[in-house]
Image (tube, helix red, strand yellow):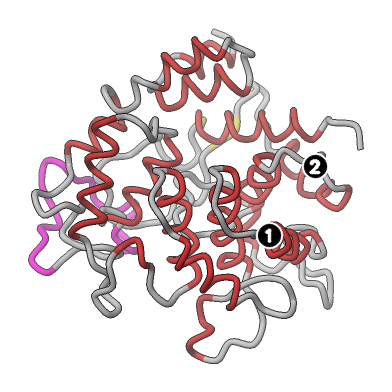
């Protein structure tokens, strides 16, 4: 079996992206496969797990009080670590966006409308699509809202006000943080890019470019001051990446912008290339521990369809002549 065959022998969420990004399939074929995400496999399973109250696990960012932390629909955290639970509304919608569920699908629209009407943040009971105070959370909420066609201009305005002079963002702004963080910045950039690509009314181009420059000036993973690697975990590729930062996530963001690759990503691209296995796949690495409804991969150290898809399309894009 070739790597392409292996990728296509999978869930509709992977198949439709492989058809679009790697196989050069027609728009009609891609759309037909994408339509299956809400009806079969992982996407359908997540939609079916929505609470009667409108969200997932009874909470916005964290499971609600009394939520059962074990049972037939849940898998324990890997390696016995507690981690952060990933079964509440925000991380579930994050995954649905990564699966590429058709945002116009009636079942998806019904699910997101219920979130809009009922789910409130733990911070101060704000409505879900009004956002809260942390840039990481607000960036992800902008991405989700824009993806599904819901108004998120208020959150975007806040993020534009909160951009740091160095170009990025930091979730710890409320606690006095003076400089940006990679994780906060990539979460906001993901949100602003989706907002822009879906026709958002506010002009976010300049802010997005400044945020990109923050990452590019640091080669995507090095300190600007010393050139040292900021965090060795960023050199390992996880999926789902949740709120976390890593090199492959950053590269896939830059690919998604549609712009030619900047020369400053070359070291990061070389890292991705070196991680390819002799059989042509990439492994799953550094899974972020925490309660999940179900796993999307076989586990760390095993061949990963998600990382293989993402790394392959990044390397294909990186070959564009500069």
Indicate the secondary structure of the residue bearing disc 1.
helix
Mark 2 or mark 1: name the one nearer the start of the chain: 1
Up the image or down, 27 lies above or below 98; here it is above
Q: Which residues are magenta?
A: 65-85
Report how far apart the C-alphas of labels 2 and 1 lie in the structure: 25 Å
Label 1: which residue? 208
In which quadrant is the N terminus drawn? top right
Q: Residue at x 10, y 58 (%)?
A: 68
Q: Point out the frontmost of discs 2 and 1.
A: 1
In the image, 314 versus 291, the foreground residue is 314
Q: Quadrant of residue 40?
A: top left
Q: Residue at x 24, y 51 (%)?
A: 76
Q: Residue at x 30, y 64 (%)?
A: 61
Q: Residue at x 28, y 46 (%)?
A: 112
Indicate the secondary structure of the residue bearing disc 2.
helix
Q: Residue furthest bottom?
A: 176
Q: Quadrant of residue 141?
A: bottom left
Up the image or down, 17 lies above or below 197; here it is above
Label 2: which residue? 270
- Residue 168, horizontal then vertical, whole percent: 67, 71
- Residue 199, horizontal then vertical, whole percent: 56, 45
């Amino acid at each position: 079996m070739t790597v392409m065959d292996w990728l296509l022998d999978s869930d509709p969420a992977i198949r439709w992206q492989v058809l679009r990004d790697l196989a050069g399939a027609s728009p009609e074929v891609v759309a037909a496969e994408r339509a299956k995400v809400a009806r079969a496999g992982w996407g359908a399973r997540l939609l079916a797990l929505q609470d009667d109250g409108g969200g997932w696990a009874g909470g916005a960012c964290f499971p609600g009080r009394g939520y059962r932390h074990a049972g037939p629909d849940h898998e324990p955290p890997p390696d016995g670590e507690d981690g952060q639970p990933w079964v509440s509304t925000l991380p579930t919608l994050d995954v649905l966006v990564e699966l590429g569920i058709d945002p116009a699908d009636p079942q998806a629209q019904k699910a997101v409308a219920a979130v809009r009407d009922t789910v409130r943040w733990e911070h101060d009971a704000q409505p879900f699509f009004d956002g809260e105070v942390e840039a990481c959370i607000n960036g992800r909420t902008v991405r989700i809202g824009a993806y599904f066609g819901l108004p998120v201009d208020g959150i975007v305005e806040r993020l534009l006000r909160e951009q740091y002079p160095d170009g990025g963002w930091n979730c710890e702004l409320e606690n006095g943080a003076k400089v940006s963080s990679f994780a906060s910045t990539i979460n906001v950039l993901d949100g602003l890019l989706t907002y822009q690509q879906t026709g958002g009314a506010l002009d976010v181009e300049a802010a997005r470019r400044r945020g990109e420059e923050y990452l590019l000036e640091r080669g995507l993973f090095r300190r600007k001051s010393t050139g040292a690697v900021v965090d060795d975990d960023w050199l390992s590729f996880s999926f789902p990446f949740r709120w976390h930062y890593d090199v492959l996530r950053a590269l896939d963001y830059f690919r998604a912008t549609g712009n030619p690759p900047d020369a400053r990503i070359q070291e990061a691209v070389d890292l991705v290339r070196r991680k390819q296995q002799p059989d042509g796949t990439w492994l799953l690495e550094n899974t972020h521990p925490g309660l999940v409804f179900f796993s999307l991969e076989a586990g760390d150290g095993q061949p990963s369809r998600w990382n293989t898809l993402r790394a392959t399309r990044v390397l294909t894009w990186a070959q564009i002549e500069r």
